Amino acid sequence: MTYIFKHPGEMGLRLLEHLELTVVALLIASAIALPLGVLAARSARVRGPLFAVLNVIYTLPSLAIFALLIPAFGLGFVTTEIALVAYAQMILVRNVVTGLDSVPAPLRDAARGLGMTTWQSLVRVEFPLALPIIVGGLRLATIATISIATLGGKIDAGGLGTLLFAGLSNDDPERIVAGSVAAAALAIGADALLRGAQRLATRA
């Protein structure tokens, strides 16, 4: 723990790098997962094959994903982001589908009866009702992304993983503890923030 207080500048830099890795990955992953989830919720023919592919990606060891990506994209930020986005898809898409499936059919029918288009029903009726479940998926994806992003430290992408791997390489337990504690604190803080957002979405 003393490493954290002795090196506040480095800790701050690594924390910001880790936040960047996490936030960028989640934004990209959400932008991809949302339309995929809507498509899967609307079409059973799409849902089965899509979930099969995403499940295969999700069950692959994270180090294997990095090893597959490095020859094509090299070391660093881009490879780490691709891996993080790929891993987040299963969680995010599944929760979008679950959320939309939870909307009662009579409400959809009522929206259509009021003259809403499919798009209007989705935006005005279905998404607001599905939002708590979707945010719940974002919580899980955020924690997983923060955890897996530590591997970026091994391939020069920065973040708190840099401290972990530097500590392992130099037999420096203080660095290992500092990186681990900071990553855990970041995950707990992010989860608390999104838990609050989920409560607000549920009340709305």
Image: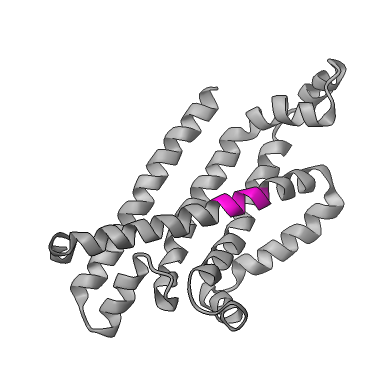
Identify the residue shown where x is 83% and y is 15%: 114
- Image location (x, y in percent) of residue 64: 56, 79
Instruction: Determine whether, in the image, residue 12 is placed left or right of residue 131.
Output: left
Tell me where residue 87 sits by quadrant. Answer: bottom right
Identify the residue shown where x is 43% and y is 56%: 20
The answer to whether residue 74 is above or below residue 77 is below
- Image location (x, y in percent) of residue 156: 42, 75
The answer to whether residue 112 is above or below residue 86 is above
Highlighted range, magenta: 27-33
Tell me where residue 131 sits by quadrant. Answer: top right
Q: Does 54 lie within the magenta span?
A: no
The quarter of the image holding the N terminus is bottom left
The prevailing secondary structure element of the residues shown in magenta is helix
Instruction: Determine whether, in the image, residue 139 is placed left or right of residue 71.
Output: left
Count numbered badges in the picture.
Answer: 0
The answer to whether residue 123 is above or below residue 44 is above
The answer to whether residue 83 is above or below residue 51 is below
Q: Does 29 lie within the magenta span?
A: yes
Instruction: Determine whether, in the image, residue 72 is placed left or right of residue 123.
Output: left
Identify the residue shown where x is 67% and y is 63%: 55
